[in-house]
Image (cartoon, rainbow, N blue to C red):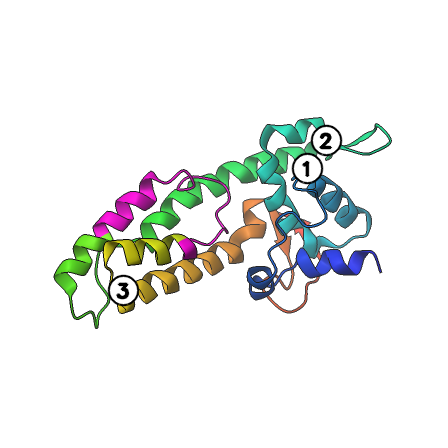
Amino acid sequence: QALRPLKEFYTPSFQVCVDNPPVGFLSDDDDRFNIAVVNVARLTDTPSMLPTAFYQCCEAGGALVHGWPHEEGLSEHLSPDDLTRCFEGRDRLAREAVGLVGRVFVCSPAAQCIHPGSCELSLRDIQADALAHEDAGAATILASWCSFIVDLAEEKGLCSLCKEMLLKRDLEEGRNIWKVLPGLFGLEVEGWDGDSAGGASLSN
């Protein structure tokens, strides 16, 4: 019963994660809570939870080394192998994030755009703002750019077709990253990006 709500948030389904992001889940805004999620997934042999849990662990950065403090004064830690897996995965996520921004924020207007000249200028401005954004190279690559796109589209006078083009690309690139998320942490998860999950094993 305790595992069920965790599995609903730390899920192999991209759509479920989009609808119910696990950020801050039961964590009091302390990303180190995800250390416990990783350990529970290991203890209960529930590998479908691992990729999302590792992804959330990345938010804690170097604080992961100190573990997640319990109320009784003890701290829970990742195993040395899982700690290494998390830091190496964080580096891979950050590298992927740079490419994702370039793929989402292209400067070519939508095919049916009726103001291609002005929209191209707007798209160039939006791309420049995205590349300069503090999250452009961050490991939080699954965080949608939707709000950013909507706000900048209005500010820069982008047409609705070009705005929808960016929003569609944002969703598509998020799914593409989701598909390879286990591999970024050196995992193979059977049934990943589906409605059910199976076993997992370390990749060589």
User: Could you tell me how far apart the alpha carbons at marks 2 and 1 are, in whole angstroms?
Assistant: 7 Å
Q: In the image, residue 83 lies at what x, y percent? A: 66, 34
Q: Position of residue 24 (x, y in %)?
A: 65, 47
Q: Amino acid at mark 2?
A: Gly
| Residue nearest the observer in this picture, 119 or 67 | 119
Is the Cβ of the residue at disc 2 closer than 8 Å to that at disc 3? no
Picture residue at 51% right of the left edge, 44% below the top: 140
| Amino acid type, residue under disc 1 in the picture | Arg
Confirm whether residue 204 shows in the render. no
Q: Which residues are magenta?
A: 124-147
Please check the rendered image and state whether residue 60 is part of the magenta-colored stretch, yes or no.
Answer: no
Residue that label 3 marks: 162
The kind of residue tagged 3 is Cys
Mark closest to the chain's N terminus, 2 or 3:
2
Most extreme residue toward the front, as rendered?
Answer: 155
Query: Which residue is at a point 63% across and 40% down the rendered structure image?
Result: 57
Residue 20: percent from the left, percent from the top? Answer: 61, 60
Secondary element under disc 2, as helix, strand or loop, is: loop
Q: How many marks?
A: 3
Whether pointer 2 and pointer 1 mark residues with C-beta atoms closer than 8 Å, the reply is yes
Q: Nearer the viewer, residue 30 or 66?
A: 30
Corner quadrant of residue 33:
top right
The residue to which callout 2 is attached is 67
Q: In percent of the image, x 30 and y 44: which residue is there?
A: 129
